[in-house]
Image (cartoon, rainbow, N blue to C red):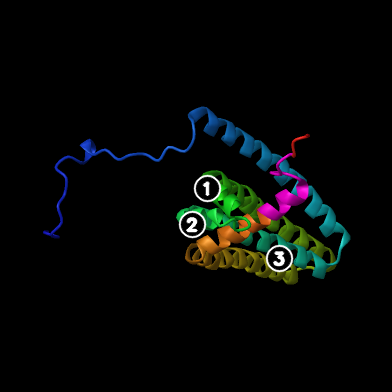
């Protein structure tokens, strides 16, 4: 079958340049650090969410689950936007001293780490916690109901949370790719605001 395209004679001899992100030791340290942070964050958030769900009624329990799902979707959008954004417009913005432009450049230059935190750490943790919280809500319903009602609630709520998470992230991916520069800039503005409030990045005045 002739598709009018040229094919290499020996594809094994073809060489492609790999995109090197940092040093090998630096990447290893980052993987270890992010793994430890994920474990600590997941454990602490699971404990907090379980404690909150135990002390509130069904309505607020569902609201907490929805908030957790929403957080996961938002961070998923940020992670994808950072990997899709173009750095060049932000250099012009930084030269004009736009608020948050330098932070946006740093986010893009560290896209692999930002994506790991947003998509893998926060996003996946929110997915795990929302699933655990959903099971906890079903357990609370089971204490006041029995039989087929519990089964219906379990299937309906689990399906609802899964559909909301998957559908939200699917829509979020499109939004993130189409508006990547805008999203990254807004995240840069927030990062700049937080850094200023915490006192990071401020130049120390020299004593005369």
Q: Residue 147, percent across and down?
A: 75, 68
Which residue appears at 66% of the width and 53% of the height? 191
Q: Earlier in the sequence, mark 2 or mark 1?
A: 2
In this picture, residue 103 sits left or right of residue 130: left
Give the label on residue 85, or none. Answer: 2
Label disc, if present, on residue 202 of the rendered structure = none
**Circle 1 sits on which residue?**
111
**Magenta-drawn segment:** 192-204
Could you say whether the residue bearing mark 2 is in a helix, strand or loop? loop
The mark that comes first in sequence, 2 or 3, is 3
Residue 80 visible from this viewpoint: no
The reply to whether discs 2 and 1 touch (Cβ–Cβ < 8 Å) is yes
Q: CA distance from mark 2 to mark 1?
A: 9 Å
Location of the C terminus by quadrant is top right
For image coordinates 66% across by 42% down, the residue present is 38
Residue 40 seen in this snapshot: yes
């Amino acid at each position: 079958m002739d598709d009018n395209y040229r094919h290499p004679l020996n594809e094994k001899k073809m060489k492609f340049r790999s995109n090197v992100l940092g040093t090998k030791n630096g990447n290893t340290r980052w993987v270890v650090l992010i793994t430890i942070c994920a474990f600590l964050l997941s454990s602490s958030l699971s404990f907090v969410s379980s404690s909150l769900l135990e002390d509130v009624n069904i309505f607020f329990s569902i609201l907490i689950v929805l908030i957790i799902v929403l957080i996961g979707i938002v961070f998923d959008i940020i992670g994808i936007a950072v990997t899709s954004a173009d750095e060049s417009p932000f250099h012009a913005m930084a030269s004009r001293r736009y608020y948050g432009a330098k932070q946006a450049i740093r986010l893009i230059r560290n896209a692999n780490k930002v994506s790991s935190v947003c998509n893998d750490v926060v996003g996946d943790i929110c997915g795990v916690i929302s699933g655990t919280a959903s099971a906890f809500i079903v357990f609370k319903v089971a204490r006041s109901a029995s039989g087929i009602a519990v089964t219906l609630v379990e299937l309906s709520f689990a399906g609802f949370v899964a559909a909301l998470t998957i559908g939200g992230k699917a829509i979020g991916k499109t939004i993130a790719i189409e508006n990547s520069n805008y999203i990254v800039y807004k995240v840069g503005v927030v990062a700049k605001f937080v850094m200023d409030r915490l006192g990071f990045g401020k130049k120390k005045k020299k004593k005369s």
